[in-house]
Image (cartoon, rainbow, N blue to C red):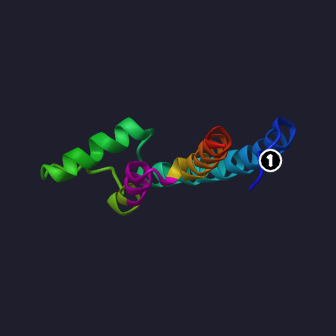
Amino acid sequence: MPLMEQQEWLRRYTKLKAIADRVTEMRLTRFRALCKEAHVENGMMLHNAMVGLHYGKPWPSVNYEAAKKAYHWDQTGWLYEASRIVESWNLRVWNEGRAR
């Protein structure tokens, strides 16, 4: 691929970043809804509830089916995966340009 001009890079990056931001926001909305279903207010409370479950002291008010799914999403990085893909593309493009 020939060197990408800055205007072309900016056009592509802006488009990809906007898509990634929308995907991330949709995932965060789903995560927040799942936390609400699990009866936890935020990621820290979710983490603490999962620690309690791990040590045999589950919180009685927590829906652990929903909590486990939300915790998995949080721990695997699924929530921000789209942004990481865009950043990987950006690094690849800039490194290709510098190698020439």
Is residue 26 found left or right of 3 in the rendered image?
left
Is residue 32 found left or right of 55 in the rendered image?
right
Where is residue 25? Give x, y as percent.
65, 46
Front-most of residues 51 and 92:
92
Is residue 20 found left or right of 41 in the rendered image?
right
Q: On screen, 4 above or below 69?
A: above
Q: Residue at x 45, y 50 (%)?
A: 77
Density class for disc 1 (Cα within 10 Å; few <14, some 14-19, many ≥20) is: few
- The quadrant of the rendering that contains the C terminus is top right
Front-most of residues 20 and 30:
20
- The quadrant of the rendering that contains the N terminus is bottom right
Front-most of residues 86 and 74:
86
Residue corresponding to mark 1: 12
Q: Residue at x 37, y 36 (%)?
A: 44
Where is residue 45? Give x, y as percent.
36, 38
Q: Residue at x 67, y 46 (%)?
A: 93
Q: What residue range appears in magenta?
A: 69-78
The image shows a total of numbered marks equal to: 1
